[in-house]
Image (spheres, rainbow, N blue to C red):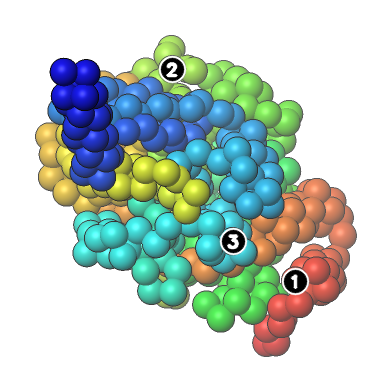
Amino acid sequence: MKKILLTTIATTLIATSFTTMAKAKDGFSGNTNIWAWTINVPPLKQAAKIFMKAHPNAHIKITNLGHTALLQKLSAGLMARGKGLPDATLLQDNHFDSFVRIYPRSFVNVGKMGYDKLANLFPTYKANAYKYKSHMYGFPFDGGPAVIFYRRSTFAKAGVKPSQIKTWEDYLKYGKIIKAKTGKFMFGGNDDDTVYRLMIGQYGKGYFDAKGNIDMNSPRSIKALKLIKRMQQAGIIHHRGTGWTPYMRDIASGTISALPQGIWLAGNIEMGAPKTKGDWGVMLLPKNGDGDVAAATQGGSGFLMFQKSKNKQLTYNFLKYYTTTVEAQTLAFKGGLFPSLLKMQKTNVFKESLPFFKGQKIWLVGAKALKIIKTTNFTEDYYYANLESNKLFTGVIFDNKDLLKRLDQTAQTIKARTGRKVNKY
């Protein structure tokens, strides 16, 4: 009897063990942990709740980290061969190369898991941002298209129509008129190169060309920097204090009459400057008509999976659900993010007239920009090049120094640090 009982128990345990293993391998069971930051966390948790309700054996944890803290922990974990890393993480587009190209064996080729077949669900530039050696190594998510936000009342007071601003030269021309008649600024920039990156990004250019050569001394780069310097000299750029609070304070007070920024700023304006309801409009970026487009990116993010994950299939299935279904992306959209999933643009939420923007359908403006954005080669040296580029704005644009000389010095400094060639023109 005792022998029969032990045999029965053993058989039960083995059966239970096989059942548990089967559940773990079905891709909808077990545990996974995903890192993200601030605004991304609530919709991720909502989507995880829906996913777990459909798959009761799945346990999805969303860990909220500040963006800077996330990058620091990610860098430390990769240098420690995966120690302390989660199953997956959210990452900004311009940091993808900085991690995947340096630590390719640390990340999962999700293209081979099936995501290569889903790349066409996104704009070309967005899918390209998450490719490595022709395969998808990430899940595209937030689009980050840049637009111009403008104050309707300030433009009207100055007698300027948004439709008159077709080029960046127009932006300068009418910006001076607005400043003269209202005292308001056309930029709310800190001492960084955001607008410069937007201007060259409209050509599909960045600090580096498609081959990875340093391209900051290109004619278009020089043209953009000279124009920004002229804007500075014309007094239409307002210098705010460091940090987000002074920026939002200037927006709420009306100090800034227009600003180029990612369309995601719409939610920040609505929450941070509620009294300005009905006074904001949105338009595409100005363009020069010499090969550029009226769009570029400011921000944008996606997800990456780590090889150290013990439950890759569950992690993949959840992130596939989150990034490719209208249900999940509607949660993200309502949470203040701008999905790059193309089929989202056909939904009713994208076509809504927004009272805060005087009934304008601003998401359709962002959708139009999303479709024409060009691919930029960030490279694994983006972070360092960005640091050096920002110095141009404290040392050249905003001071009376020789622009071309300092630009060449910057290119040579990046060359010395990275070993990359500097293009000659």
Q: Is residue 419 above or below residue 296?
A: below
Q: Quadrant of the C terminus?
A: bottom right
Q: Secondary structure under badge 1?
A: helix
How far apart, in angstroms, are the residues tagged by discs 3 and 1? 17 Å
Identify the residue position indicated by label 3 in the image: 103
Residue found at x 13% / y 39%: 347
* Quadrant hosting residue 354: top left
| Chain-order first, disc 2 or disc 3 | 3
Give the residue type at disc 1.
Thr
Residue 124, located in which quarter of the rendered image?
bottom left
Q: Residue lying furthest right in this view?
A: 401
Mark closest to the chain's N terminus, 2 or 1: 2
Residues under numbered marks 2 and 3 in contact, where contact means CB atoms less than 8 Å apart: no
Q: Residue 149, located in which quarter of the rendered image?
A: top left
Instruction: Decide: few, some or many residues near mark 3? Use Cα within 10 Å; few <14, some 14-19, many ≥20.
Output: few
Residue 302 visible within the image: yes
Q: Position of residue 3 (x, y in %)?
A: 21, 24
Secondary structure of the residue carrying tag 3 is loop
Compared to residue 316, the image places residue 2 above or below, namely above
For the point 80% across and 69% down, which residue is it?
A: 417
Q: Identify which residue, 46 or 358, lies in the foreground.
A: 46
Residue at image mark 1: 418
